[in-house]
Amino acid sequence: MSRLMHLAVFAQGVGVGQSVWRSPRTAPDRMHTFDHWAHLARAAERGCFDAFFIADALNLSPAVETDATDRPDPVAILSALSVVTDRVGLIGTSSTTYNDPFTVARQFATLDHLSDGRAGWNVVTTAIPAAAENYGSARLPEHADRYERGEEFVDVVRALWDGWDPDAIVADREAGIWVDQAKVHRIDHHGQHFDVAGPLTIPRSPQGQIPLAQAGSSPTGMKLGARVADLVFATQHSIESSLEFAEGMRALAAAAGRERSAVKVLPGVTPIIGRTDEEARALAIELGSLISEQTTLKFLNQTFGGIDLSRFGLDEPFPDLRDSLPTNASVGRPTLLTEVALREKLTVRQLAQRVGLSIGHRTLVGSPDTVADDLQQWFEAGAADGFIVLPADLPLGLDDFVDEVVPRLQDRGLLRRKYRGATLRDHLADG
């Protein structure tokens, strides 16, 4: 069987484009409704995507005055969507810095039961200082400390998921025995950050070990992803850099005792699609014109750990800040953005404009054939096992991709035409 492309959609409000709520292509008055989320999840399922993915943030956007980017609870939404979808995977984000392992293990095991085995957990350590203030801390923990806690957190969650044997439930009505207690195990974990007895309060879920996603691109983040993740969401802007990242992840996975192919690398891409390349470019200009410099600068400032980029001059060359980031800041995303800016000789203003429609991911503008050609080139070069699609505007940005690009990928034999398995883990193993 030929290799197949894996796809996940990153669903956020009315899209990842900043201020796209101003576009008539969006319906911001509906973004909090169940119907809005249901439409998006069904579209992803119509396109035979592996997963519908909801990211999260634990603080309000610094550009909230102009940017409609609120973040409702992912697990609550995905639980509801499990009722109106049948096959698409349901991946939600939950922080290892501001949660408890027992709670996260129970939440995602419950989602896995509700969805008949379609749950996935996106592991994040949370890199935004404002989130710390919402959880009683004046300062975000150091980068190394967050990942140290995150490593242990994941190990505890996975141990809890294994606490019930698959055949622990006896359900013998005549004998009056519900569970074989010998097959329900405490984990008795005593570590540096957590003391957890277990077992979970619900039996083993359909997938047992629920697939994990992760997006860290710092050396520490890549090491964690290579050890535990089934999906790694990448932020790469060229085939060459993505191929280097993917090969690095595969080598790290092998070093961790896993198969090189165990980790699926999905670079993010924001497709802006028109019937022709010219129409797509016009749409990109139209959406971009809605974004204020104030909004994009606030986003960049947050991404770079609170550094005020406006002090460098908007039309000055973007500075090399890789050695100037706060020690508790995210490392991977600002490093990648800095490298793009230096390589392409972008000014502060130009980098801000570049990320305005795609939150720092690659923007792909063109006709359905142009978009499909590009994705095929990356995929066949081995630079990607698939893609996480981040529509600039919703719902039309996703509808356009599913209705126009997906059939072209299917016609080329790159994407499944129907689901061949029932669980998220089945989808990840398909191709």
Image (cartoon, helix red, strand yellow):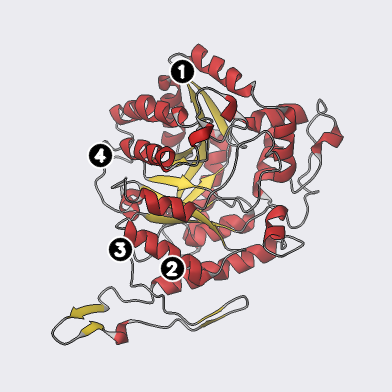
Which of the two discs, 1 and 4, labels the residue nearer the N terminus?
1
Mark sitting on residue 418: 4
Camera-side residue of 14 and 10: 14
Q: Which picture quadrant has residue 113?
A: bottom left
Q: CA distance from mark 4 to mark 2?
A: 31 Å
Q: Secondary structure at mark 1?
A: loop
Q: Is 232 above or below relative to 2?
A: below
Q: To which residue does mark 1 refer? A: 274
Q: How far across and how far down the image is residue 333, in percent?
A: 65, 45
Quick check: 48 left or right of 63?
left
Q: Is residue 156 left or right of residue 333?
A: left
Instruction: Name the residue tied to disc 3.
Output: 206
Between 244 and 423, the one nearer to me in the picture? 423
Q: Earlier in the sequence, mark 4 or mark 3?
A: 3
Residue 22 in sight: yes
Q: What is the three-letter code of the residue carrying label 4? A: Lys
- Image quadrant where one finds the C terminus: top left
Q: Amino acid at mark 1?
A: Gly
**How far across and how far down the image is residue 359, in percent?**
61, 37
N-term-proximal mark, 2 vs 1:
2
Q: CA distance from mark 2 to mark 1?
A: 43 Å
Q: CA distance from mark 2 to mark 3?
A: 13 Å
Mark identifier at residue 106? 2
